[in-house]
Structure formats: C-alpha cells, structure tokens
Image (tube, grey):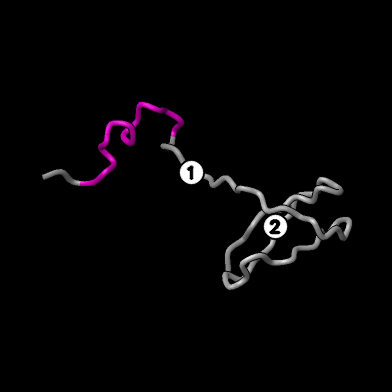
Amino acid sequence: MPLYEYQCPDCESRFERLVRSSDSAPKVTCPTCGGERAERLLSMFATSGPRGGSASSASSSGAACGPVG
C-alpha cells in the first residue's frame, strides 16, 4: 500500500495515509479537524548524495558506476 501525504484546506494540517492501490479516489478525513476535503500533495522523495559532502567525488566522475570493460 502506498503512503500519500495530504493537506487539509480547512486547518492547513499535513498528514500521511496508507491507501489501498485499488482505491482510485479514497475519502480522506483530516485527523486534526475532521474535515473531509483533504487534498493529496505531490510528495518529494529523498536522495542521498555522495558521502563526505563533496560534489566532485566518485559519483560525479562516473567511477561509482561499476566496472568498465
């Protein structure tokens, strides 16, 4: 089941819900105010960069891609 982020337009609360993939438009109720007009947000996903914080590390040069040849 995917996890979606929602925002309530009534109280501006943000919350997450697990939603069955078979539900095309689930009815989501705000846990803060009970409002029934919560809107699904476009979620940002996290990525991890190279360890050490240097942008010029192996990942930018392609060396972390595996063996060549």
* Horizontal side of residue 19 vs 64, given as left or right: right
Tell me the magenta residue range: 52-66
Task: Check if mark 1's residue and mark 2's residue have beta carbons within 8 Å.
Answer: no
Work out whether residue 53 or residue 2 is closer to the camera in this orientation and state it: 2
Residue 68 vertical placement versus 52 (above, below):
below
Q: Amino acid at mark 2?
A: Glu
Which label is found at residue 47? Answer: 1
Image quarter in which the N terminus is found: bottom right
Q: Which residue is mark 2?
A: 16
- Image position, residue 2 (x, y; %): 58, 64
Residue 20 vertical placement versus 45 (above, below):
below
Q: Amino acid at mark 1?
A: Thr
- The local secondary structure at tag 1 comes to loop
The residue sitting at 62% across, 61% down in the picture is 3
* Horizontal side of residue 47 vs 43, given as left or right: left
User: Dot 1, crowdedness within 10 Å: few (<14), some or many (≥20)?
Assistant: few
Which label is found at residue 15? Answer: none
- Image position, residue 40 (x, y; %): 68, 53
Q: CA distance from mark 1 to mark 2?
A: 20 Å
- The local secondary structure at tag 2 comes to strand
Based on the displayed image, in which of its 4 quarters is residue 68 positioned?
Answer: top left
Residue 55 counted in the magenta span: yes
The residue sitting at 81% across, 45% down in the picture is 12
